[in-house]
Amino acid sequence: MADPIRFYFDFNSTFSYIAIHRIDALAARHGRNVDWRVLSLGHLFHAQSIAPPPTIPAKLKYLALDFVRSCSFVGLPCALPKVFPPDVKLARLMFCRLQRHDETAARSFAKAVSLALFGHGVDVATAQQLADASKPIPGISVAEIEAAAADPKAKKAVISALDAAVADGMVGAPFFVLDGEPFWGADRLDQLETRLKEKA
């Protein structure tokens, strides 16, 4: 079987929101699986000596416009949260805790949380906010999210994803690696699919 597509993302990345809702269907059309890996985008920028887009006024202004336009093109709702970039540490840890036991639930969680955050502009910083955002996913409670916050295996998974991302040359999110070839950005999903067609 062909290797899975590595998919690196962070919950505080606007364009990761778009990729989270598209990558599995895209891969499935070509018989590929996807290896989802959440990381801290802030730590990635530090590791790669990259200035985060929110710190560059001109880039932030453009990205705000481009994000709304891009969501519209793919049929996703769009609403930026009041606090940007948002605090998503708990979301990362909960995703990793879920992923360890139930990959399907972890991906459903990522879709629900990203939709709440960037589809409806809802903050997800606290355990209660995160539980509210992920209500469609069975078994997610404030207590379970608080357990994830103290889960050393979840923390290790986030760190491991960062190390792998740096090794793969990741420079921003979302980031995909197909058979060793990197693609950066939700606007590269079409190119990724073209490459998959070529490999068929």
Image (spheres, rainbow, N blue to C red):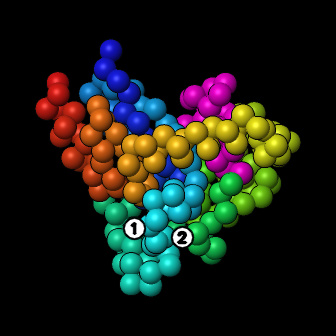
Q: Earlier in the sequence, mark 1 or mark 2?
A: 1
| Vertical arrangement, residue 134 with respect to residue 78, above or below | above
Residue 115 image-quadrant placement? bottom right
Residue at screen point 40% across, 57% down = 171
Magenta region, main secondary structure: helix
Please state if 43 lies on the left or on the right of 186 as rendered: right
The type of residue carrying mark 2 is Leu
The quarter of the image holding the N terminus is top left
**Measuring 42% from the left and 31% from the top, which residue is drawn there?**
34
Q: Residue at x 46, y 32 (%)?
A: 35
Above/below status of 151 relative to 9 = above
Q: Quadrant of residue 48?
A: bottom left
Q: Residue furthest bottom?
A: 57
Asked if residue 93 is among those painted magenta in the image, a careful observer would answer: yes
Q: Residues within 10 Å of mark 2 (few under 14, many from 20)?
A: many
Q: Position of residue 73 (x, y in %)?
A: 31, 60
Is residue 29 depicted above or below 125 in this figure?
Answer: above
Q: For residue 25, which quarter of the picture?
A: top left
Secondary structure under badge 2?
loop
Q: Give the residue displayed 64% in from the left and 73% down from the top.
A: 83
Q: Is residue 53 left or right of residue 158?
A: left
**Residue that sits furthest to the left in the current view:** 198
* Secondary structure of the residue carrying numbered label 1: helix
10 Å neighbourhood of mark 1: few (<14), some, or many (≥20)? some
The disc at residue 67 is: 1
Q: Could you tell me if the residues under marks 1 and 2 are in contact, i.e. CB atoms within 8 Å?
A: yes
Which residues make up the magenta segment?
90-109
Task: Estimate the x, y position of residue 200 in percent, counting from the top left.
Answer: 17, 24
Q: CA distance from mark 1 to mark 2?
A: 9 Å
Residue holding disc 2: 80
Residue extending furthest toward the right:
143
